[in-house]
């Protein structure tokens, strides 16, 4: 259909003759200096970003619930598209996908009940969250509490408390003689992706799962110091979220959900087969109050005023727990909105900025704060173009994704549909899932190639924290380095590994495009965004509690825009090759510290692996030295060097995927199999060895085969990355 055509066809590559002609027009200059005067562009961005504009965008976006696939999400997609057309973007497209999503029944809420010996309910959970402050919290469009893609069901049984529901927690239960088979698992949010909890329970034969947020993490100041007076979770708050472990449309894995797609039967897809339901900690208190069995280990006890017990079952003889879930899956249309500011010299090279648009309720933090920033970045860049004559060297592509909350659906389908072009042409992808989940410091997830990009940009953006400025830290970078320092690099801020918690996932882990994700975050001592995915994630939460005056969000927006212009305009890409070299060496050392003795005992040599990393370091040094002799007036030479730089990340993509994980292709960075949110270096190796000594001999042997095969694959791809930095074939 017309809306599905690749938006970039109009941006076809320059022909060889055009490149040659262009090279004659270019003047020789520093490879790190863009053509339009970066200092003036940076100054323009810093002055032009308007906190009040961001506030107005957010006010509109949070005015009603807008889950993926709903009429409200579609209307918001059209509103974003119309806004971008009004700003004068060169192209704006709505790209629809027909996908499987999931919803509760609005008139029949999902419920948990404590049942007496006669099967009568002595207590019933709340179907909806209680409105507390903002008028919109009482909207009839607010959905009942649910976890997306939960299987429907009405089950009764004993309950087992499984702490955070991690693999190691289930293993500890087994060591304590407590089985979850046939039981209803009660687990806490906060340490791993909720879908990992559901899958860990399902594969052990659990009948169902109940998830809750414990006040130990989500209301650490006590139940009186909660929303709307603070940012902490009230007893009525319930965190929604998907429990689908795979990403994208579950009916069309590996392929886009377009009209011609082949769709699996739902029963053959990756959707969970057991009911899963979130509850508030107010409701969890009542479940725990009635539970029997031994007391939970001391470290498993939370912040509720009850005795935490493991179960199975209730303290009262014959009493059970009932779990009634009416959540159902349904086909729906979700929309991506894609806009383009066409590049003047390399229109077929893309710097992509993205944020998702759908929210479980109002999405004041996630994602609408990010959507407001994306709209402001677009406004500022078009103003830069209109007022100064600037046009980026490379094309800047802005993307508003649909149905991310269900499992990165919109971005995954788009990457599957246009993956070949995107692998060939994309310079980098910068994601902002949300701008603010706290105001303690900047937080960055990044591929090593983009470290210098974010370091340099953060050093240009004025610090929005007046107390920090008064303390002698005038720039965003200064507070970041002081409050979240890199323990291995004194004086430098910490950059976290890229997991799969947002729309950067497909770009990094499937296409080999270097990615960045930025936001303002909380003090690590807090460790959670308390009102995440709840009814209370409102405009008021952001406007009155997180960021009065929108200064922090404005700073984040400036940072995003400056990085976009930097990547789009710099003649030779300033990719951080030395950082990647150091990252590989450090990751190798950490792997050997953790598992070296185990590997040696197996007589598996790591020599080739080490040699490959050393070879990459040497190739990096030679490439950087050669750049000093680059003729920057020769556009073909510049293009060749940039293509080599773009190929580095692609070189780590294995088309066969990680062991037993064909949906993850990046051999250096991928989330662990036990936690899809967190990034891990060489996870294909560490996952193979994690807990291997607890397995049966035949299972151990299978793991060792996986390890050896994947070690050889990683070694090959690191050697490949070294070779792409050379002009020689051999």
Image: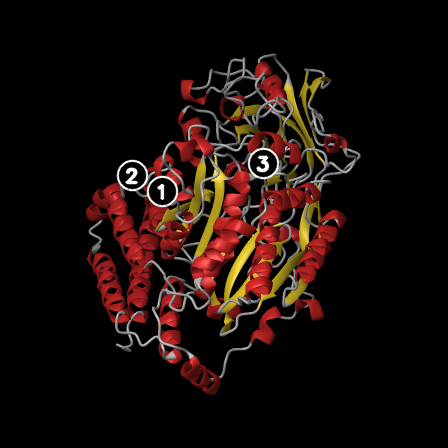
Q: Does 226 sit above or below residue 168?
A: above
Q: Residues within 10 Å of mark 1 (few under 14, many from 20)?
A: many
SS class, disc 3: loop
Q: Residue 142, percent across and down?
A: 73, 36
Residue 409 horizontal/vertical position (percent): 60, 53
Mark nearer the N terminus (1 vs 2): 2
In the picture, measured across the screen, residue 611 lies left or right of residue 378, that is left
Inspect this view and state whether residue 510 appears: no
Name the front one of labels 2 and 3: 3
Which numbered tag is attached to residue 487?
A: 2
Q: Residue at x 58, y 62 (%)?
A: 387
Q: Secondary structure at mark 1?
A: loop
Please tell me which of labels 1 and 3 falls first in the chain: 1
In 3D space, how far apart are the residues under numbered discs 1 and 2 (Cα atoms)?
8 Å
For the N terminus, the quadrant is: bottom right
| First reached walking from the N terminus: tag 2 or tag 3 | 2
Q: Quadrant of residue 720?
A: bottom left
In the rendered image, the vertical position of residue 368 relative to residue 632, given as above or below: above
Q: Nearer the viewer, residue 535 or 353?
A: 353
- Numbered circles on residues, count: 3
Asked whether disc 1 touches disc 2, contact meaning CB atoms under 8 Å apart, the reply is yes
Read off the residue under disc 3: 549
Q: Dot 3, crowdedness within 10 Å: few (<14), some or many (≥20)?
A: some
Picture layout, residue 113 above or below residue 687:
above
Residue at 42% in and 48% down: 458
Q: Which structural element holds mark 2? A: loop
Between the residue at mark 2 and the residue at mark 3, the CA separation in whole angstroms equals 33 Å
């Amino acid at each position: 259909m017309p809306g599905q055509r690749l938006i970039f066809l109009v941006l076809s590559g320059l022909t060889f003759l055009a490149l040659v002609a262009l090279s004659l027009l270019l003047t020789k200059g520093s490879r790190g200096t863009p053509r339009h005067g970066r200092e003036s562009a940076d100054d323009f961005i810093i002055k032009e970003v308007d906190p009040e504009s961001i506030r107005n965008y957010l006010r509109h976006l949070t005015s009603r619930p807008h889950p993926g696939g709903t009429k409200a999400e579609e209307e918001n997609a059209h509103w974003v598209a119309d806004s971008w057309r009004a700003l004068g973007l060169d192209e704006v497209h709505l790209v629809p996908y027909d996908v499987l999503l999931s919803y509760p029944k609005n008139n029949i809420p999902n419920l948990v009940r404590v049942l007496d010996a006669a099967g009568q309910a002595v207590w019933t959970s709340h179907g909806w969250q209680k409105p507390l402050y903002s008028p919109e919290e009482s909207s009839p469009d607010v959905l009942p509490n649910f976890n997306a893609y939960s299987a429907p069901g009405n089950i009764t049984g004993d309950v087992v408390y499984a702490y955070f529901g991690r693999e190691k927690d289930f293993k500890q239960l087994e060591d304590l003689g407590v089985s979850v088979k046939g039981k209803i698992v009660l687990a806490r949010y906060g340490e791993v992706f909720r879908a990992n909890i559901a899958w860990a329970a399902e594969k052990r034969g659990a009948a169902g799962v109940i998830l809750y947020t414990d006040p130990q993490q989500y209301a650490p100041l006590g139940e009186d110091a909660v929303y709307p007076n603070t940012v902490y979770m009230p007893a009525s708050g319930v965190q929604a979220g998907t429990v689908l472990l795979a990403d994208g449309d579950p009916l069309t894995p590996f392929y886009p959900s377009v009209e011609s797609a082949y769709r699996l039967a739902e029963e053959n897809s990756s959707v969970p087969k057991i009911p899963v339901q979130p509850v508030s900690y107010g409701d969890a208190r009542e479940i725990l109050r009635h539970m029997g069995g031994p007391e939970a280990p001391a470290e498993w006890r939370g912040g509720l005023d009850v005795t935490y017990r493991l179960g199975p079952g209730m303290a009262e003889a014959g009493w059970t727990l009932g779990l009634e879930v009416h959540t159902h899956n349904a086909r729906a249309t979700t929309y991506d909105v894609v806009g383009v500011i066409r590049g003047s010299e390399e229109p077929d090279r893309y710097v992509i900025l993205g944020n998702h648009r759908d929210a479980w309720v109002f999405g004041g933090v996630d994602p609408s704060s990010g959507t407001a920033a994306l709209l402001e970045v677009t406004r500022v860049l078009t103003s830069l173009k209109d007022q100064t004559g600037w046009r980026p060297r490379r094309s800047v592509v802005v993307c508003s994704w649909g149905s991310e909350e269900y499992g990165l659906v919109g971005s995954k389908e788009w990457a599957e549909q246009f993956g070949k072009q995107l692998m060939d042409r994309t310079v980098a992808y910068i994601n902002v899932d949300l701008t603010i989940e706290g105001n303690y410091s900047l937080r960055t997830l990044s591929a090593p190639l983009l470290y210098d990009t974010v370091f340099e940009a953060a050093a240009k953006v004025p610090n929005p924290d007046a107390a920090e400025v008064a303390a002698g830290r005038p720039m965003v970078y200064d507070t970041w380095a002081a409050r979240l320092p890199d323990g291995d690099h004194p004086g430098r801020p910490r950059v976290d590994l890229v997991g799969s918690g947002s729309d950067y996932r497909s770009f990094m882990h499937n296409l080999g495009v270097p990615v960045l994700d930025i936001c303002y975050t909380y003090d690590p001592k807090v460790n959670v965004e308390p009102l995440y995915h709840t009814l209370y994630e409102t405009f008021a939460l952001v406007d009155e509690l997180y960021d009065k005056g929108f200064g922090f969000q404005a700073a984040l927006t400036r940072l995003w825009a400056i990085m976009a212009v930097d990547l789009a305009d710099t003649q030779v890409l300033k990719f951080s090759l030395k950082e990647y070299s150091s990252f590989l060496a450090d990751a190798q050392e950490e792997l050997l510290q953790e598992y070296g003795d185990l590997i040696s005992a197996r007589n598996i040599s790591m020599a080739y692996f080490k040699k490959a990393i050393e070879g990459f370091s040497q190739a990096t040094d030679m490439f950087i030295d050669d750049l000093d002799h680059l003729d920057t007036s020769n556009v073909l030479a510049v293009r060749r060097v940039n293509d080599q730089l773009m190929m580095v990340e692609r070189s780590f993509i294995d088309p066969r995927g990680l062991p037993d994980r064909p949906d993850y292709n990046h051999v250096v960075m991928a989330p662990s199999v036990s936690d899809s949110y967190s990034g891990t270096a060489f996870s294909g190796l560490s996952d193979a060895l994690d807990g291997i000594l607890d397995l049966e001999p035949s299972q151990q042997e299978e793991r060792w085969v996986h390890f050896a095969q994947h070690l050889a694959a990683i070694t090959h791809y690191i050697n490949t990355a070294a070779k792409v930095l050379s002009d020689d074939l051999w």
